[in-house]
Amino acid sequence: MFQRIAFIGMLAAAILLQPLAVVAQTKTLKPGFNFFSKDQDIQLGKEAAAQIEREVPVLNNPEMERWLAELAKPLISQPEAGDYPYTFKWVNDPNINAFALPGGPVYMNTGLLSHADNEGQVVGVLAHEIGHVALRHGTNQVSRANLFTIPAMIGAMAVGDRGILGQLSQLGVGLGLNGVLMKYSRGAETQSDQLGALLMHRAGYNPLEMANFFEKLEALAGNRSGVANWFSSHPNPGNRVETVQKEILTFDRREYNRDSKQFARMKAMAGKLPPPPAAAKPGQGGQGAAQVPIPAASSIEAPSSRTRTHSSTSFEATHPDNWQVSRAQQGEAVTIAPSYGQVQLPNGGGALGYGAMFDLRASNGTGRLEETAAAIAQEVVRNNPGLQTTEEPMRIMVDGKRAMLYMLSGPGPYQNVTEIVVMAVIERSANDVVTAIFVAPERDYNRFEPTFKNMLRTVKVR
Ligand SMILES: [Zn+2]
């Protein structure tokens, strides 16, 4: 409290004495509250990098790697970058994403390069990721989310023992891109933009290119699911261009003219890369390395009893109001899930850990609901290796329509945890059916079953 008052006092004094631009310059971005030491950030980052690199297709292209290191060099040489042992690697993945691990490892998907308009935009992503490392957002968030457990853990920890990552996984903190270690708050996003802008400015790149690129990705996100990973780990704090413009006002004037002149060639090279080795597709679980630790049971927010209704052309689904609706890029498919239920797998794929999915599907042409439902169930099993039906399908009625109910279980997106899947195939017309799929880990299934039943009971088919 004392510090805060002192800070406000200082700021007031500064406003009285200085022109506005200089006031803003006195603001420095500092890492927030953290139980971990800088060395522990570095150690955790090393352990996490070793795991990540077993799971994502790191690109082996010395020329592109050299270029990335060259772009990053003038950024990390600034004192504000915090003197971490930074490393920069490309991931051969057409989806748009980049992520930083505590203490320095930064990964950029080649898909970013394919969507960038100039070198400054690539540098912008680097600068933003460096911001997350320097401001220690990952371990700051882990510290805040585990106020009571982390100090004891660190107290009992000998480095080199089971490793920090291993200990964190006991708390349900893993490398899933949706986890607290990798999914940043909007406040953290703004801070990374601010620090990134400063680093770009010092390096001779126009900081606005960073904000421009993020806004471009935002516009793409509406119709391309390949951008979803980026916004899942880096949520849009809004007003990015404005934020960066304000930062630029606090910098001394300079020309932004750094350019390696290699952007066009590198972008062309990224466009011609061989496809990455096949990875698990969204919705596929049970692939060992493609799984993440399950969140701690205590961190699972219960479904709210207050509801909202999602309406599409062919159906209506009522759901807890603390679950979010994500639409597919085409058709009426929709995922309705709590934020922790949409799992980002380390290989860049996504899977549903908790929540529901609805879709409109064509029937198989025989006019027999049982056959259409069986074909859909087979497809679900085929796409989710290890998943099996556990009971004979049941005939039920949903909203006055005939429906087939399937119970399935098998490996899901969480390590060592069985996933329960309930699927209803509801006859809409002679030509199509509405599918409603509900998913929760066996550990928590009983807590979610009443919600699933309510959702199924209130589905409207139109
Ligand atoms: Zn970010």
Image (cartoon, helix red, strand yellow):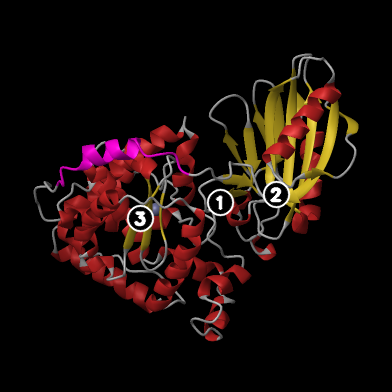
Q: Earlier in the sequence, mark 1 or mark 3?
A: 3
Residue 305 shows in the view: no
Q: Nearer the viewer, mark 2 or mark 1?
A: 1
Up/down of 361 relative to 117, above or below: above
Q: Amino acid at mark 3?
A: Lys
Q: Are marks 3 and 2 in contact (CB under 8 Å)?
A: no
Q: Which residue is mark 3?
A: 89
Could you say which quadrant of the image residue 216 lies in? top left
Dot 2: what SS? loop
Q: Nearer the viewer, mark 3 or mark 2?
A: 3
For the N terminus, the image quarter is bottom left
Q: Which residue is mark 1?
A: 345
Up/down of 377 relative to 448, above or below: above
Give the CA distance from mark 1 to mark 3. 19 Å
- Classify mark 3: residues with Cα within 10 Å, few (<14), some (14-19) or many (20+): many
Which of 364 and 321 lies nearest the eye of the viewer?
A: 364
Dot 1: what SS? loop
Q: Is residue 335 left or right of residue 100?
A: right
How far across and how far down the image is residue 421, in percent? 76, 44
Q: Amino acid at mark 2?
A: Ser
Q: Is residue 254 left or right of residue 454?
A: left
What's the mark number on residue 304?
Answer: 2
What's the mark number on residue 436?
Answer: none
Give the CA distance from mark 2 to mark 1. 26 Å
- Classify mark 1: residues with Cα within 10 Å, few (<14), some (14-19) or many (20+): many
Image: magenta residue range: 259-276
